[in-house]
Structure formats: C-alpha cells, structure tokens
Image: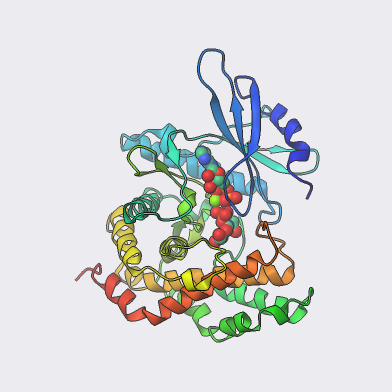
Amino acid sequence: MAQAEQTLQEVLEAFDFGAPVVGALRYGCGHINDTFVVHTQPEDCCCRRFILQRMSAAAFKRPDQLMENITGVTEYLGKQIQSQGGDRSREAMEVISPKNGQPYYTDSQGGAWRLYPFVEHTVCHQAADSPELFAASGRAFGRFQQLLKDYPAETLYETIPHFHDTEDRLAKFKAAVEADKLGRVKDCQPEIDFVLAREADCSVALNAMREGKLPVRVTHNDTKLNNVLMDEATGEGVCIIDLDTVMPGLVIYDFGDSIRFGANHCAEDETDLSKVSLDVDLFTTYTAAFLEGTGGSLTNDEIAYLPWGAKLMTLECGIRFLTDYLVGDEYFHISREKQNLDRCRTQFKLVADMEARWAELEAIVKQYQKA
Ligand code: ADP
Ligand code: GN1
Ligand code: MG
C-alpha cells in the first residue's frame, strides 16, 4: 500500500475538525497502523488535537467490521463510565465520523482512515519505569475487562481471525520455514529449534478452553503498556486505546500480553540479550493490580493459568515476529534490518526466564485463588 502521506491531504479534507487544521504529523510507536496527530487552531481557544489513523490493510481485511466493533464497544464503555460517575470524554475513546457520515473514510487508494479526539494531559509510556506505573496499567486493563464483562461477545467480529490461536500461529510459522522464500532460515536455526521444542505448549490454553476450564470473554488482546494512556498528573490509567483487537478471547491473554511487554526493562527489539530478563517483582505487582481491576471476577482456573497466559503470549509474539522476518517483514513495521528477528529473540529470552522461574510464578498467582 502507498505511503499514508500520499493521501493525507485528501483525508484531512474529508473530516470536519471544527477549526482550521494547522498541521498533521506522524505520531506514536505503534507497529501496525499509520498514526498522525492533527493540530487545529480554533479562534477562541488553544490548539485542539486529534488522532487520525490509517488502519493497517495488512492486518485488517474488513475495516467495516473493525469499525462496527469499535463503535459498539466505545459507546458501551462510554455509558458504563458515565453511570459510574467517570468522565466519558477522557476515559473512553470516541469515534468522530467523516463528513460522509460513515464511521471511517476510504481514500482514493483504498486506505481506511478513522479519527478520534486526542486524550489530552495523558502520557503514553514505552516501558514500565516504575512499579507504580505498571500497577496503574494493570488496574486499567483489569477495569477494562470488568467494564465489558456483560458486553455481548457474540456481536463482535473477529477482526483478525485466529489472532491468539497459538496452534494456528505455529502452523503459519512452520509454513514460512518450509517456504523459506527469502533464504533467511539459515540466520535463525536456534530460534526455529526453540519454537519446535515448545510445540505442545502452543495447545495448553486452547485445550483448557476446549475442556471448558477457561471461559471465553470480551478481551482487548493487545494489552501493551503503550496501549493505555496515563494521567500526566496522577499517573493513574485514564483510557485504554488501540481497540482494533477487542474480540472474544481468554482473560489470560490480556494479563499475559502485559507481562510480555512490561515485566522487564528492555525495549522489545533490544539487541543485547544479556539485558533482557523477566522481572518477577513486576510480575507480582501486575498480578495484584490486574486482579484488583477485574474486581474479583476471575475464576480459580483463570487465576491458575495466568502464568501460562504470560508464557504463551510471549512465545506466540516471538513466533509472529520470527514468521514475519522469514516472509519479509510484511506485517510489523520495521525501521531497520533484522528488527523482527531481534524482537523475536527478546521474546524467547523472556520465555526461557519464565520457564526457569515457573514455580515462583505459580506460587505468586496461587495466593489470589479463592478458598
Ligand atoms: P497501533 O495499533 O499502531 O499501535 P495505536 O492505536 O496504539 O496504534 O496508536 C498509536 C499511538 O498513538 C499510541 O501508542 C498513542 O501514543 C497514540 N494515541 C492513539 N490514540 C490516542 C488518543 N486518542 N489520544 C492520545 N494519543 C493516542
Ligand atoms: C502490535 O498495534 P500494536 O503496536 O499495539 C500487534 C500485537 C503485538 C505487538 C507487539 C493488531 O501491537 O499483537 O503483540 O504489536 N497488534 C496487532 O509489539 O497485530
Ligand atoms: Mg498500539
């Protein structure tokens, strides 16, 4: 797909910003969508900002269904937050329709764009610089889970089919190794062997779901620390963003993806693996905070499987980065060569750490099981 900048002007004209647009700049550190911050200058007050995004065509084949999900979920969240006395305009995303009244705009190249108000006086963190910050994100993601607990999951489209189907991710990985279309297999045999040694693990959560041990709920499915906006003054979680993958799923996925990204002190693409390790104290902190946020609504089995959520989300993400490296970096944005291979390596280092400290992780979550 062409660079988003090519149609940016056309897209800006498709929306009514209520004031003259004075600039639009690339924004944020997401791996998937093309995100811009749009500055406008109303006559009577200071600059108002918006988030304008071109949804990734590689990731999302049906932007119509994606936006139906997001519209439904954001309206529902808005009502829930209002009924609890919260501030709807800060605590829930809000879709702003283009002038044509649709929930999103399709540009002349086929790109699908949406607009949100910029949630001001918030900070988006790329790393858990303090336990307090990580705890705040855990409470926010747990609360998100609780707010959506009665949302009719069956009305949600699967925006990315088989998103956290680790068995399917494994099958796609094997196909990429087999095809080796760019001759990259030779660069990553240890990583390939790492995955193959963990084939059985890929079925653990799915088996528990099939056996009825883990219930299907509405989940966010992409609970990275940088998908929650924190209040710049209090440090508390304000608004959960990046709702593209809100779908039916397992709660251990939401817990696990946060641990994968946040319970260590390195960037996802750190090249010095000696710096990458699981911080068990942060795991402990996040567990308490997330469970507090969910308001005690998880079953004992769900709690028991939390370490599996952490391990599987990390293993799966590593498998996805490695697969993308093998097929030529088609899905995750990269800014340098081998970045997806480096990302894969950090994930596998974290998986190995989790395995080494498995008994500790199980003991931590066990404390929260009800008698
Ligand atoms: P991606 O799927 O590519 O990660 P996101 O929806 O997470 O895209 O947006 C990318 C970044 O843009 C976020 O990490 C955050 O910094 C910023 N962002 C997104 N939505 C908003 C918003 N409504 N207000 C303020 N910042 C936002
Ligand atoms: C992507 O969209 P973003 O950057 O928050 C990806 C996640 C991965 C993550 C790895 C829709 O998240 O699944 O875990 O990168 N999102 C999608 O950083 O594929
Ligand atoms: Mg994001």
Q: Nearer the viewer, residue 53 or 280?
A: 280
- Residue at image position (35%, 66%) is 283
| Residue extending furthest toward the top | 44
Chosen colour scheme: rainbow
The mark total stands at 0
* Residue 158 seen in this snapshot: no
Q: Is residue 117 left or right of residue 87?
A: right
* Residue 97 seen in this snapshot: yes
Check the image and report above or below for 95 versus 362.
above
Q: Is residue 128 left or right of residue 168?
A: left
Residue 235: percent from left, percent from top: 35, 43
- Ligand 2 lies in which image quarter? bottom right
Check the image and report above or below for 98 versus 60.
above
Q: Quadrant of residue 180?
A: bottom right
- Residue at image position (68%, 67%) is 338
Residue 81: percent from left, percent from top: 37, 38
- Residue at image position (71%, 75%) is 176
Q: Is residue 215 left or right of residue 368?
A: right
Residue 309: percent from left, percent from top: 43, 70
Q: Quadrant of residue 13?
A: top right
Residue 175: percent from left, percent from top: 71, 78
Check the image and report above or below for 371 versus 65.
below
Q: Is residue 254 left or right of residue 339?
A: left
Q: Nearer the viewer, residue 125 or 52?
A: 125
Name the quarter where the C terminus is drawn: bottom left
